[in-house]
Amino acid sequence: MLKQAIAKIKNLFPAPEVHAHCDGPCGVYDPSSARIAAEAVVSMTKKLMDLEIPAAGDKEGMIAYNNTFSRYVAIKEEQAQITKKELLILWTDYFKPVHLEKYPDLHDTFWKAAKLCSACKVEVSIQHANELMDAVQKIHQMFWATKDRDITWYKAS
């Protein structure tokens, strides 16, 4: 009976339709968080590739190597996932259909960037890590252009 009464009230006084570009219309977006995480992916990838395997029979050296290797991998994968999350927030919450007019490759750019995040998680590839940085840079430029702002691209490392 209560459900029927609530349904009648909703029919008599429907809520107005609202529109927001995200779940919480804060308006605070910035691709820099994706850049920082992607830079960490590049850094960890370089560190993994530079890691020296200890001599055969060096038990302590192998333990230290495995510990360092696993830590670098964990950080690389975590940062690749953070990069993906930050990019997906921009793609799904910030960018709107009107942006497609100016950037017809917007969806493809984000899709490929997300795929690069996945590749960086499952591989140790400096090529893919650098391609991810390039994709994040392109998204940075698209994003700030939609706000008519010229924000210089820079890397912390």
Image: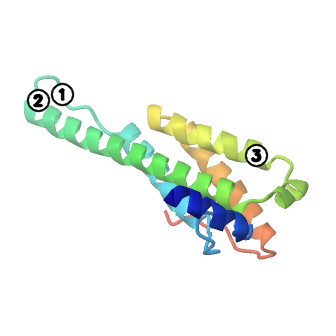
Calculate the distance from the C-alpha at mark 2 to the C-alpha at mark 3.
Answer: 50 Å
Q: Position of residue 113 (x, y in %)?
A: 64, 44
Q: Nearer the viewer, residue 26 or 114?
A: 26
Question: Is residue 62 placed above or below 140 in the rendered structure?
Answer: above
Q: Nearer the viewer, residue 24 or 41?
A: 24
Q: Which residue is mark 1?
A: 55
Residue type for callout 3: His
Q: Nearer the viewer, mark 2 or mark 3?
A: 3
Snapshot quadrant of residue 74: top left
Q: Whole-percent x and y of residue 60? A: 9, 36
Q: Residue furthest top?
A: 56
Q: Is residue 128 above or below residue 104?
A: above
The mark nearer the N terminus, 1 or 3, is 1
The residue under the point 75% across, 42% down is: 108
Residue depicted at 10% across the width and 23% down the height? 57
The residue at which mark 2 appears reads as 58
Name the quadrant containing residue 52.
top left
Give the CA distance from mark 1 to mark 3: 48 Å
Identify the amino acid type marked 1: Ala
Q: Disc 2 marks which amino acid?
A: Asp
Q: CA distance from mark 1 to mark 2?
A: 6 Å
Identify which residue is drawn at 74% across, 59% down.
95
Q: Which residue lies under the disc numbered 3? A: 107
- What SS does tag 2 mark? loop
Quadrant of the rendered structure where residue 26 is?
Answer: bottom right
* Direction from residue 77 to residue 137 in the image, left or right: right
Q: Nearer the viewer, residue 67 or 2?
A: 2
**Residue 9 position in % (x across, y down):** 64, 67
Secondary structure at numbered mark 1: loop
